[in-house]
Amino acid sequence: MNIFRTIITFIIFFCGTSTFSQSAKFAEVDGVEYVSGYLARLLINENPFPGEKGYKSLDDSKIGMVQILWVLHSRLKYIPAGYRQEHVANIKSEDIIDIITAQGQCDGFSRDEKGVAVVVPRVEKRLNYLLNIANKGDKPGKFSELINYGQGLARAYAEGGIDKADRFAGLEIIKNIMVTGRAYSWMTDKDYYRPGGDFVYIPDSLSGSIGGNRFYTLKKKGNSK
């Protein structure tokens, strides 16, 4: 009888544990129709996760998310003297989604013929892949930590705040070139990817390579009139 009770207790415990493992969600991302969900997809899409090319550490990918958010915010709120927003962001707008979906800016993110902000299938496919890994097992891990970090940044921004310092805000000179400070572009960190024009490459000595991306500031111009 004692053996029978022990077996029953074990089965109940095992089934309960299995149910918990299968139902637990350690990471979630808001719907693509929400500003917080759309922005989170960009931050997650543009930064490497463990095992992916360009991945260095959790902190590196988190910093990459913060800096990409600052690029978008700078394009929205901090256009330097001598520039127009259209020069920097390829659009004139006060909407963060417009900054993301402007033509030729963020690969895989655009508006459809009805003006709805959408992402290409590969973005959603990778996100689902990352979420699947993040929600496996019986405790949260690196994948859930990164996803939740990106989603947290996006939600905080959508609610009206950006609480991380811009590490590039104080830049003044890069290789004898006067610059505006702040980053205004990012691209995959390969020599053959360059935005051109007045964008200035931020070198490794100034921590310009983060999360597999290279960040760029702008040449300083005279005061606009």
Image (tube, rainbow, N blue to C red):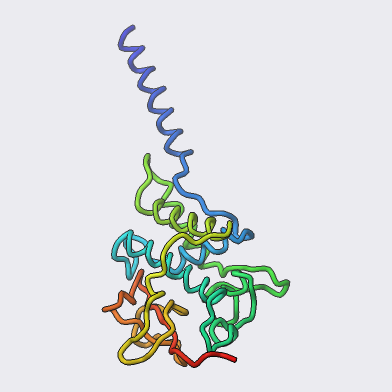
User: Residue lying farthest right?
Assistant: 114
Left or right of 198, for residue 103: right
Name the residue located 33 percent from the left edge and 6 percent from the top edge: 1
Q: Nearer the viewer, residue 220 or 136?
A: 220
Quadrant placement of the C terminus: bottom right
Give how far across and how far down residue 160 sits, in percent: 57, 59
Name the residue located 39 percent from the left edge and 78 percent from the top edge: 215
Residue 214 falls in which quadrant of the image?
bottom left
Give how far across and how far down residue 217 sits, in percent: 42, 82
Q: Nearer the viewer, residue 214 or 176?
A: 176
Q: Nearer the viewer, residue 214 or 23?
A: 214
Give how far across and how far down residue 97 sits, in percent: 61, 69
Give how far across and how far down residue 6 sits, in percent: 33, 15
Q: Is residue 196 above or below residue 216?
A: below
Residue 22 falls in which quadrant of the image?
top left
User: Residue lying farthest top?
Assistant: 1
Left or right of 3, for residue 85: right
Left or right of 128, for residue 8: left
Name the residue located 62 percent from the left edge and 68 percent from the top edge: 118
